[in-house]
Amino acid sequence: MKEIEVIKQTIRVKPFSVTELAEFYGCSVKTIKTWLAPIEKDVGRRMGHYYTPKQIRIIFAEWGVPADAIAH
């Protein structure tokens, strides 16, 4: 049986735009909007150009944290 080491990292969540999310997940803005549609009820609508840190936590919980977001 293989042992798996789990590394827990703290990620500082900040407001992100749809464009930034698309870059993090390696897809287009159109794709991100399509992915957001089913979870919009949980996430809520954006206020302005950015999703709030609370909304970003919900998105990360749903889709997983992209590796690029850890570096920011």
Image (cartoon, rainbow, N blue to C red):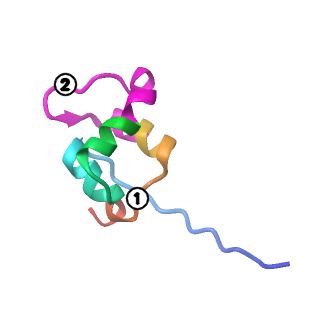
Residue 68: x and y in percent read: 33, 64
Please give the name of the residue rendered at 35% of the width and 56% of the height, measured from the top-left corner: 25
Quarter of the image holding residue 29?
A: top left
Amino acid identity at mark 2: Met
Mark with earlier residue (2, 1): 2
Please give the name of the residue rendered at 49% of the width and 51% of the height, measured from the top-left corner: 64
Q: Tag 1's secondary structure?
A: loop
Q: Can you tell which mark lies on residue 7?
A: none
Q: Tag 2's secondary structure?
A: loop
Which residue lies most toward the left here? Answer: 48
Quarter of the image holding residue 34?
A: top left
Q: Is residue 50 magenta?
A: yes
Residue at the spot of label 2: 47
Closer to the camera, 13 or 58? 58
Residue 60: x and y in percent read: 44, 45
> Which range is magenta?
36-57
* 57 relative to 22 in the view: left or right: right
Residue at the spot of label 1: 66
